[in-house]
Amino acid sequence: MKNALVLARKDFESYVHSWAGVLVSVFFLLIAGIFFSFFVLGYAKISLEAAKGAYETVQGLGLTRFVFSSFFLNMGSLLIFWVPLLSMRAFAEERKQETLELLFTYPLSDFEIVWGKFLALLGFLKMLLLPTLVYVLILSKLGGDLDWGPVAIGYAGFLLLGSAYLSLGLFISSLADSQIVSAIVTFGCLLIFWILDWVAGVTDGFWAHFFSALSPLDHFREFTFGVLDLSHIAYFVFFHFYFLFLTLRSIETRHWKG
């Protein structure tokens, strides 16, 4: 495990200093700030109009639900654009620079290589989320009546969704010879998952349940509402292990070729 952490640190630093890492960071924080501002201003407007009697049914809509549920839902949908840019470098870049075979000669097991690269991606995702905690502090300092439990669950759900997508991107990167190909295929797969969520919303009966069960966004939505359901956690745990397992099998194919 120590070797995996060393690799994770190396890869994490390479993400931080890469153009893709900088680009993702800038756009993530920029869009996150815009979304947060819009939702806070929207809530302030609705609250003001409700106080004047313009709305009769808005009293049950709290600050946490309106701002942070909307924030996480929208940011979760945009992960389909950010994740491909991050995960494409994991294996595809090393294969392009012909350093992948060198990595295999290090005293690292295949599991440590996969786990180390996944931890690097997860660490970068956490780094992106960290500045958004300032939003929570700002609302709290301004006197906002926040429900801390749902906020924490929303952050946990976002990390689960993001890391699940990264595990898929890591697997695709292990197969691709080009970063561009890796990014395009990852985006295509994540787009399919987004479409599954849309299809689940326009169908009913068996098919609605079927597509909902397959859709990561559908399982993530409950987290944004502050609902902690073990079935949704189990879904993301399985998603992680499934694609990390496939990634491990993918890099082990070099032994078959040898």
Image: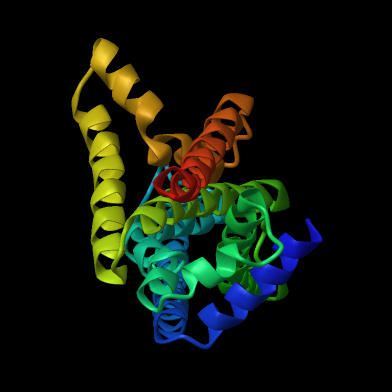
**Image coords of residue 70 (percent x, y):** 43, 54
Q: Position of residue 249 (x, y in %)?
A: 49, 41
Residue closer to the observer: 1 or 72:
1
Q: Residue at x 41, y 39 (%)?
A: 216
Q: Is residue 124 left or right of residue 19?
A: right
Q: Quadrant of residue 217?
A: top left
- Within the image, what quadrant is residue 34 found in? bottom left
Q: Nearer the viewer, residue 31 or 106?
A: 106
Q: Please identify the quadrant where the N terminus is shown.
A: bottom right
Could one spot residue 53 in this view of the protein?
A: no
Q: How is the image coloured?
A: rainbow
Q: Name, please, the residue furthest toward the front.
A: 258
Residue at 61% across, 51% down: 110
Residue 196: quarter of image: top left
Residue 108 vertical placement versus 85 (above, below): above
Residue 165 placement, left or right of 17: left
The outermost residue toward the right is: 2
Residue drawn where x is 56% and y is 47% of the image: 160
Q: Nearer the viewer, residue 136 or 204?
A: 204
User: Could you tell me residue 167's position as x and y percent?
Assistant: 49, 50
**Is 62 left, or right, of 45 in this rendering?**
right
Residue 205 can be seen in this image: yes
Q: Position of residue 118 (x, y in %)?
A: 58, 58
Q: How many marks?
A: 0
